Amino acid sequence: MRLSPWLTTLTALVCAALLLAGAWWVLNPGGPPLQSASFSLATITPNADGHTDATRIRYTLRRPATISIYFVDANGGRFEFRQDKARDAGEHTVDFSGIVAPYLRPGEAFEGEVLARVLPNGTYQWVITARDAAGEQNSIDGALTIAEADTTLPELRGLAVGSSFFTPNQDGLNDRATINVYLTKEVNPESLRVFLVGPDGSALPIGELGGDILPGQRGLHTYDYDGGIDLGANPPPDGQYTVRAEVEDRLGQKLATETRLTIERGGLPRADIVNATVDFSATTLRLGETLFFTLTVENYGVSPIRTSGPPAGYVYKSMAENANTLGEFEQSGAWRVGIDCDTCIRDYPWRWALGTPETLTALEENGQTHYYLMPGQRATISGGIVLDKITESRNPQYFWAGLIHEDVEVAPVNNFVDAHFITVVANQ
């Protein structure tokens, strides 16, 4: 017998309604959202001794809900463990080791901020609350005792930067930032971290210096920051930065403290002798005549490069005279042009600044005036040496130029530049 069209349609609608009702009942069973909750232990002893340090929390949700787990002490004080966290339907577990959201007791004060802290000894009411999408809510509670808790916080005291003025550019002045912080409680070695906070919130780790106090031990910890230049990386851009220290003890108690650091004139120094070319005044000179040279240096980096005398244009009065005899000793981080030869008893004995005070830029650092070749600037340097000695076994001999970054390097591209055979002829 054939059913009428309207009866077929009605049957289909009834079946669909029954299926939807069944699905609703499965996905949204009757009753409050939190079906059950329990703690595996009634007492825990959070002291990191490996025995009853934590209890396992189990709870079951009839349907997706937002849950909160907190503890209430005898005075009605509330301590948060989980707050308004979305969870799917079903059974959930989480371990609780006594660590709750940060709190302060009356009269307490710490440097920096407390990020997580253990509950002090006592008996607490634990409460688990669930609220579903429709706003229906219920709670289940019980009792938990905290005993033998290690409530001593790993405090961070006296975080300080040796000099807040930091110029990571390898000029030998304020190229490193020394950071000190005192830790009051022993923690795992990797649990004390010091880092620079970038503008985007990224953490740039700062390495700890070795010393009598080992990583993680109680005591003064010293950190050394070079901006990454030692590894050939550009330092962070100039600006104001936050230095942050964080620590976590074996229980999970966390503290943090911060200070400020200013980066200025930062950047990997970059310079070379333009076209690797040196103009020497002659290839044959009489004994006692002056060998002159001219070359050009370009600062193609992003940071100023410091230089030191004698000034460009100086003429060394003899081959025995050198920068040291003039009192112009090597300065860590300074850049100078040098001339060397086959018979020189030291590398680049004759050295010149990358200009004169009039052609360079004067900058104040550490209360003194220093002279710099600025980024993008070129300098033409000339000078001379009176050739007053003939070494018969090496005549002629090679003379060449170099660009020296003192106590740092003579880069291959700036070493043994444009060697010329120079002959010295004895006077008749």
Image: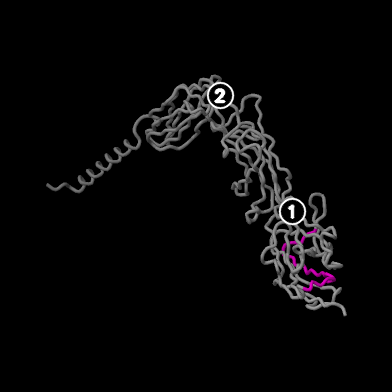
Q: Few, some or many C-alpha atoms within 10 Å of disc 2 (few <14, some 14-19, many ≥20)?
A: some
Residue 272, how many percent across, how many down? Answer: 70, 66
Residue type at mark 1?
Gly
Residue 140, how many percent across, how many down? Answer: 43, 25
> Which is closer to the viewer, label 2 or label 1?
1
Who comes first in sequence, dot 2 or dot 1?
2
Image quadrant assignment for residue 231: bottom right
The span shown in magenta is: 371-392
Q: CA distance from mark 2 to mark 1?
A: 51 Å
Q: Few, some or many C-alpha atoms within 10 Å of disc 1 (few <14, some 14-19, many ≥20)?
A: some
Looking at the picture, tell me which residue is in the foreground, 386 or 185: 386
Name the side, left or right, on which 187 lies relative to 265: left
Image quadrant assignment for residue 313: bottom right
Name the side, left or right, on which 305 lies relative to 14: right
Q: Is residue 64 above or below residue 314?
A: above
Q: Residue at x 78, y 57 (%)?
A: 330
Q: Residue at x 74, y 56 (%)?
A: 333
Residue annotated with mark 2:
120
Residue type at mark 2?
Pro
Looking at the picture, tell me which residue is in the foreground, 39 or 138: 39
Residue annotated with mark 1:
172
Q: CB atoms at circles 2 and 1 under 8 Å apart?
A: no
Q: Is residue 250 above or below residue 415?
A: above
Image quadrant assignment for residue 303: bottom right
- Look at the numbered disc 1 and give the secondary structure of its residue: loop
Q: Is 195 contained in the magenta span? A: no
